[in-house]
Amino acid sequence: MRKWLGAADDTGELRRYKADRKRRAQFLALVSQTRDELSHVYDGSATSEQKRAAKIAAIERLRMRYREMRDSRWRGYQGYDVWFNSPINNAKLAATSVYGDQVATFLRLFDLCSGDYPRFYALVRRIGALDKSDRAEALKAADSCD
């Protein structure tokens, strides 16, 4: 998308695209921060009741941090309101984080291939042909497109 908008010389659209990407990264960072908080809660020695209360508090902090970011840094941008206005649980946090991690991984691979789509697709096909554990390792370890 970045390449196409740059080639189309549409600076307004490119600026909006970059702002959207930045917001997405900030949203994913909020989710990741909350998952880290919850991981510490679950690994601790608190009772089940205390852990449930800590989870509720962590999710409320997530919502509060989002509202603060939306209203200040994002100047009222409401693109993630639907996500935050629906129930938030561990499964939703995990799915969102995994998606965000994978997007970042594939963007890194694309950059390794210098934005060359045929080379990028060839790399992804090679990695995709591996079994699941080897594929996960190859995605993490890739340091060149070849």
Image (cartoon, rainbow, N blue to C red):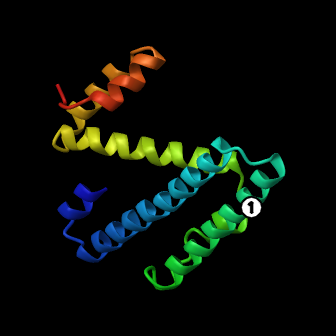
Depth check: give the residue in front, 74 or 41.
Answer: 41
In the figure, residue 14 lies in which quadrant? bottom left
Residue that appears at 38% across and 63% down = 21
Residue 23 x %, y %: 43, 68
Label 1 amino acid? Ile
Please tell me how crowded label 1 is: few (under 14), some (14-19), or many (20+) other residues with Cα within 10 Å: some
Position of 106 with respect to 37 (left or right) is: left
Q: Secondary structure at mark 1?
A: helix
Position of 112 with respect to 76 (left or right) is: left
Position of 67 with respect to 27 (left or right) is: right
Q: Is residue 128 visible?
A: no
Depth check: give the residue in front, 146 or 47.
Answer: 47
In the rendered image, the quadrant that contains the N terminus is: bottom left
Residue 131 x %, y %: 45, 14
Residue 119 x %, y %: 20, 31
Residue that appears at 44% across and 64% down = 26
Residue 101 x %, y %: 44, 44
Depth check: give the residue in front, 34 or 70.
Answer: 34
- Specify the farthest residue to the right: 49
Which residue, given by chain and number where applicable, does mark 1 sit on? 56
Residue that appears at 43% across and 41% down = 102
